[in-house]
Image (tube, rainbow, N blue to C red):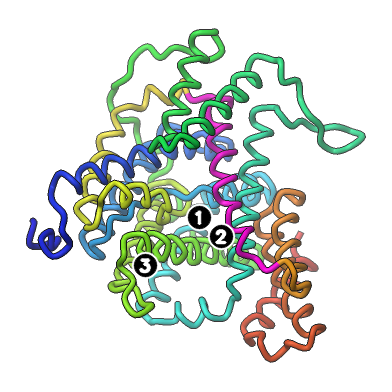
Amino acid sequence: MKKFFEFDKLGTNYRKESVAGITTFLAMAYILFVNPSMLAEAGMDQGAVFVATALAAALGTLLMGLLAKYPIALAPGMGLNAFFTYTVVLGAGIAWETALAGVLVSGLIFIILTLSGIREMVINAIPATLKMAVGAGIGLFIAFIGFQNAEIIIADPSTLVALGDITSGGTLLAVFGILVTVVLIGLGVKGGVFYGMIITAIAGMIFNLVPIPEKIVDSVPSLAPTFGAAFSHFGEVFTVEMLVVILTFLFVDFFDTAGTLVAVASKAGFIKDNKLPRAGRALFADSAATVVGATLGTSTTTSYVESATGVGAGGRTGFASVVTALLFLLAIFFSPLLGVVTSAVTAPALIIVGIMMASSLKDIPWDQFEIAVPAFLTIIIMPLAYSIATGIAIGFIFYPIMMSAKGRAKEVNPIMWVLAVLFILYLGFVD
């Protein structure tokens, strides 16, 4: 094992890697409860999604550890689960089984792009500023959902939205959770989001705002309600509307993964000559995990930037990922805790993750108007239109137009023009 993961060459050992694996798991364990809660709103069985989430995370992380040998963990992605539930299922009225089929197709396309080498061409076609804008926009969208779920922000007939009654029990509990979580993260506590959820849930139980679980460990919930559902609706994905959905799943996963790999690899010192060794294997692990996850019954599985916490704890090899994967497998026996994780408990996690994702705003050159316009529209339209896909569409339409107006048309990749036309057709002809 030491030889396979090159412990001596990388100056690490079992203890360092194990601590790193545990650290990464704690930093992203919140997804085990947030993802089932969110997909349940799309009509999916919460227990089945919980198991699918844990298994997809375990298998994806194990693949990353054994194939790419990187200390990077995977799980169903925040943002993509929001797109799945609120834009595709609730917004467009598409059955969750069909949406899962869309996730499956996006994963298969991702595998083809990875094996064929086309991914570099696609990455180069889309400007870095738009990639950052998409990430920030999804962050705002997720945070908005969190504020809504906590009823901190409510509907208002005069102003569309307004501040809710923050003195009500559930809302007050969510506010408490936000305060606790930001303090923990501010203090540098690894796994601050996860611990924040635990403390919020305990406080909720003390004040009778959260049900007390009858048990902590139980038998594994059945996967039957979601397992293989994507295949039963596979034929329904071949429509213009679903094509845009699939492309959005693919786009966000594609660049989220690339960004995470670069960020974590840079922190660990893996980048050599501006290149990431075994990048193809890492991307393959990510895309294969999406296919597995969709088959089991969860939204897109992707690499998690929280893996950087494990790297910070000393992780340098895939053995750390193996440890994280084993912990995700163990987690499937803790399904009774799902009842404790109410919207007031998950809302702080959504808001904090949104804040983290919005950090890419700092890297957008706002002083360049031709860049600022498509970036801003991408970011602001996502929460206002309640649609990640619409935000991406607007930004991609305005980018080549603004660049041409500024006399920089030669800098626009032809692929961006093609995407702009496709998105115009999408907005004009798809309800």
Q: Which residue is mark 3?
A: 283
Q: Position of residue 17 (x, y in %)?
A: 20, 48
* Mark 3 closeness class: few <14, some 14–19, many ≥20 residues within 10 Å: many
Vertical side of 291 occupied by 53: above or below: above
Residue 49 visible in the picture:
no
**Residue 179 image-quadrant placement:** top right
* Labels 2 & 1 near each other (Cβ < 8 A): yes
Where does the N terminus fall, quadrant-wise?
A: bottom left
Q: Nearer the viewer, residue 271 or 431?
A: 271
Q: Is residue 370 visible?
A: yes
Crowding around mark 1 (Cα neighbors within 10 Å: few <14, some 14 to 19, many 20+) is some
Q: Main secondary structure of the magenta part?
A: helix
Residue under pointer 2: 236
Residue 135's place in the image compared with 394, above or below, is: above
Q: Please tell me whether residue 278 belongs to the stretch shown in magenta.
A: no
Circle 2 Cα neighbour tier, 10 Å, few/some/many (<14 / 14–19 / ≥20): some
The part of the chain drawn in magenta is 341-365
**What's the mark number on residue 267?**
none
SS assignment at label 3:
helix
The residue wearing badge 1 is 233
| Count of numbered circles on the image | 3
- Name the side, left or right, on which 100 lies relative to 157: left
Mark earlier in primary sequence (1, 3): 1
Q: Residue 363: within the magenta?
A: yes
Residue located 31% across and 76% down the image? 272
Q: Secondary structure at mark 1?
A: loop
Residue most toward the right?
158
